[in-house]
Image: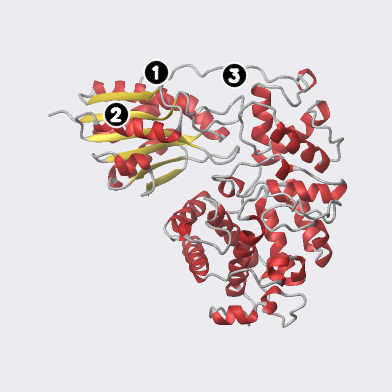
Amino acid sequence: MALRIVMSSGHGKYIRGAAGPPPWGLDEVDEARRVVERTAEALRGVGVDVITYHDDVSTSQSENLNRIVSFHDSKTRDLDVSLHFNAYESTSKPMGVECLYVSQHDLAQTVADKISAATGLPNRGAKKRTDLAFLNNTDEPAILVETLFVDSHADADAYHAKFEAICSALAEAISGQAVQPGPTPPRPVPPEPTPPDARRTISKGDKGEDVAHLQTVLGLPADGDFGSITQSWVKSFQAACGLSDDGVVGPLTWDEVDDLEDRMRDGETGLSHELEAAIDLVVQNSGLASYEWRNRGKAPAGYYGGMAKVYALAVKRLNDDDELAGIMAHAETGNQDKDALSWYADEFDEADMDNSESGQDTLRHLFVMMIGLGMCESSGDHWCGRDTTADNVESETCEAGLFQSSWNLSSCSNTIPALLDEYWTDPLGFRYTFTRGLSPSASDLDCYGSGTGARYQWLARYSPTFSALMTGVGMRKLRQHWGPINRREVDIVPQVDELLQQVDRLLDVGAKLTS
């Protein structure tokens, strides 16, 4: 009997998936449909019975997932395949292919191997995921293919050049039979980019692709509608750049947006993609998603993952003899007026966390406390603006970001102004992780004052990695900056320490593999 497969594209006509930045970025829904239909054609050519499905009806995510699963389960088949494209952050670097599974490890690995070989893109491998509705709810064996990344310029180039090879590789992996690729279709010719001096000036009330592009670069949900949220964030960005903060995107603001896009595209997070994926997995399996913080409830979906990655970055900086990381990892000083670890000595003793020696253990314990501080100050929301009940509206004293720090904290260490310069030049961090499940409000995105303080307020929200590293230094040098620390409201949670110890083990394995 011929192998029987149901293959569907992820998301739907009205429930769009990921999209890379124009003009080169890919649209997940459109391209997934192309790959599904061409792969199905190739599979039929080697005798596989294939039924395809694309959701043109659903108007909500839950309806979309239920409709796709229901369609698969309504058919007689041997295997379910869901075709997706991945996304992370706009970059010129190759990102690669992975295939997700619950029970089909070998098939998932074969899919990743063959698509990687066909494209020359990184092989991110087979990844077990037990949290996805498609993999959990279809009643036959299933895989979910993440073909490549829509927001990687290198991946997009490979997709256009190797479209036919990708579809043939997927068909071979599924069928176990050789499939000869057909001719590669001509690459779509993107429209000529609009010359900077010909761009339209946009402001609140405008709609269109240029608005969506602006929103993508500024890290906002890209709905193409210039509303109050976009206006507030544009004003803050203009103040950070030293421009007139009128909320109108004209030639000068477009120049700064283009420069930011270039810096993001060429930026480095400081961690390999493989390590980031491994951290995501240990966070997923940690059980912390259900942890209830005192008076704050559960953390946002990306909070632990983002902080775990920043911790891994801090460890790498420590191993490179970075001064800023050395401050964070220094042995507890005994100065309760300045050092949060000294102020919290009893709490750390009770949790059996020894900070008497400089090094990675002390750094980890600082991050345990910092994660608790972030929940106290912002409920883990990196978009958080100042406390509107306070009157601190000067650029130097206005709070912003995860930890509600303000720029006057920079007086405690010369490493902080240097850190601001570093992250202004390369703001690429882990915002894509931190921002999962979050949507900013217009009031959170307001900026106050001008100069370096205004730049700080913008960067603290745009690059939560910068905010966390700065706060870590401040906690060792000026702990009275934070009310929740002063009032001993920050909880030291052993389960968080256990998560970061798993990150330590990942880093140790990585070091051994590269030594």
Task: Measure the alpha-carbon separation of dots 1 and 2.
Answer: 32 Å
Q: In this view, does 53 lie to the left or right of 152?
A: left
Q: In this view, does 266 lie to the left or right of 250?
A: left
Residue 175, located in which quarter of the rendered image? top left
Counting residues from the start of the chain, the first of labels 1 and 2 encountered is: 2
Q: Is mark 2 on a helix, strand or loop?
A: helix
Question: Residue at the location (65% across, 50% down)?
Answer: 382
Query: How many residues crowd around disc 3 within 10 Å: few (fewer than 14), some, or many (20 or more)?
Result: few
Given the image, on which type of amino acid does mark 2 rest?
Phe
Colour scheme in use: secondary structure
Q: Are marks 1 and 2 in contact (CB under 8 Å)?
A: no
> Which residue is tagged 1?
183
Given the image, on which type of amino acid does mark 3 rest?
Pro
Task: Measure the alpha-carbon separation of dots 2 and 3.
Answer: 35 Å
Residue 94 in view (yes/no): yes
Which disc number belongs to residue 190? Answer: 3
> Which residue is tagged 2?
71
Residue 397, located in which quarter of the rendered image? bottom right
Counting residues from the start of the chain, the first of labels 3 and 1 encountered is: 1
